[in-house]
Image (spheres, rainbow, N blue to C red):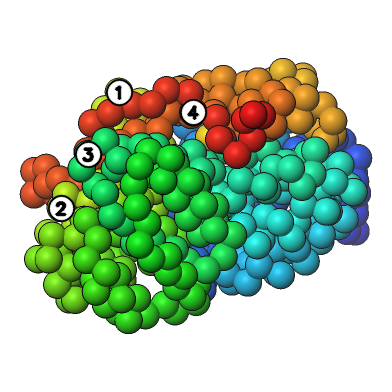
Amino acid sequence: MRTFVKFAVGTAIAGLMAGGAYAQDTVKVGLVISMTGSQASTGKQIKAAVDLYMKEHGDTVAGKKIQVILRDTGSVPDNAKRLSQELIVNDKVSVVAGFEVTPAALAVAPLSAEAKVVELVMAAGTSIITEKSPYIVRTSFTLPQSSVIVADWAAKNNIKKVVTIVSDYAPGADAEKWFIDTFKKDGGQVVETIKAPLANPDFAPFLQRAADAKPDAIFVFVPSGQGATFMKQYTERGLDKAGIKVIGPGDVTDDDLLPQMGDAVIGAVTAHMYSADHDSAMNKKYVADFTKAAGFRPNFMSVGGYDGMHLIYEALKKTGGKADGDSLIAAMKGMKWESPRGPISIDPETRDIVQNIYMRKVEKKNGQLYNVEFETFKDVKDPAKIKK
Ligand code: PHB
């Protein structure tokens, strides 16, 4: 009898916690990423960064317990929509976060708009995403941010003739357009534009076509995770020996895969928002703590996850724990802070990220390959959103 009473009371308390007091004191964050499939490397980077942030900052903010609910899309963008819907309707999350590819981020936008739930884009990089719901905010990057800067650099550094190779989907189209428009305006010549399939790409035939055009450089965008394959085939085809340089946004020389790319990648010049080699006290600690906890080097996707958690924590401090979409998004607009990548902020008008873009060159340091930063462009907004 005594055991039964204990059990009944225990169950009643658990029930109360699930429905009433507990629910009010918890802010749920749905983390919708790929832990399996072709984009798993990005999902693992983001998950490790979210875990690190919470280990450092605790799981309570403004009197609320933060509960992260992880859902694996298996790298299928349609799953992102279904899983986000379940998280919003059944789990009553205050934020859906993650989204390693543009199609996943876009698929969730109508849900975010309709349910008035913050969609925090930690990875995808197509410019237009943030315009698809007033509750979308981004802590990753846009492809135009870096493509414009590498185009100006190329034109000023004796690169006259370029072939572009981009993955055939939205961020590739953004990278290609903003590179070409800027490079041509600067007097450069684009002799061929090549689109490679997104799924299981074999770059060899495209690299051959590029080599035949005898350019000074190839401008390349491939999503995080494909850089090592691209660089391997670039070397196998002898483009490095032919003196054809690799330039682009930094996705191709991803810090995660860079150590396995081999010395042919030395000298690749890219523009990007994060390097594991970024010289700040905060980043040195970040790289050391991240590598120790995760067992691999943080890349540019990881900081989108880390800073995304920071944005949620700081917004909750500002709202005093209020977690409805209107309160949270209002608190996020204009937020400024120091990230392992350098100073960043959320543009109050566009909800997109404003950040430094660095020119970097792959070099060997203490026997390891790094993207070594050599020039900084401060507080870069998404050029696609700057009104003419
Ligand atoms: C995207 O799908 O938006 C995306 C994915 C990986 C990248 C960049 C952009 O490295």
Instruction: Identify residue for label 3.
Output: 157
Q: Is 194 placed left or right of 24 in the picture? A: left
Instruction: Give the spatial CA distance, label 4 vs label 1.
Output: 22 Å
Q: Is residue 270 above or below residue 379?
A: below
Q: Mark 2 Cα within 10 Å, few/some/many (few <14, many 20+)?
A: some
Q: Are marks 4 and 3 in contact (CB under 8 Å)?
A: no
Q: Are marks 2 and 4 in contact (CB under 8 Å)?
A: no
Q: Earlier in the sequence, mark 3 or mark 2?
A: 3
Instruction: Give the spatial CA distance, label 1 vs label 2.
Output: 26 Å
Circle number at residue 266: 2
Q: Secondary structure at mark 1?
A: helix
Instruction: Identify residue for label 1.
Output: 281
Q: Residue at x 24, y 74 (%)?
A: 212
Instruction: Give the spatial CA distance, label 2 vs label 4.
Output: 27 Å
Question: Which kind of residue does numbered mark 4 sit on?
Answer: Val
Question: Residue 24 in the image: x percent, y percent?
Answer: 85, 35
Q: Is residue 174 visible?
A: yes
Instruction: Identify residue for label 4.
Output: 380
Q: Is 46 placed left or right of 165 in the picture? A: right
Question: Residue 54 in the image: x percent, y percent?
Answer: 53, 37
Look at discs 3 and 2 and give the one toward the viewer: 3
Question: Residue 56 in the image: x percent, y percent?
Answer: 47, 32
Q: Of 179 and 33, which appears nearest the observer?
A: 179
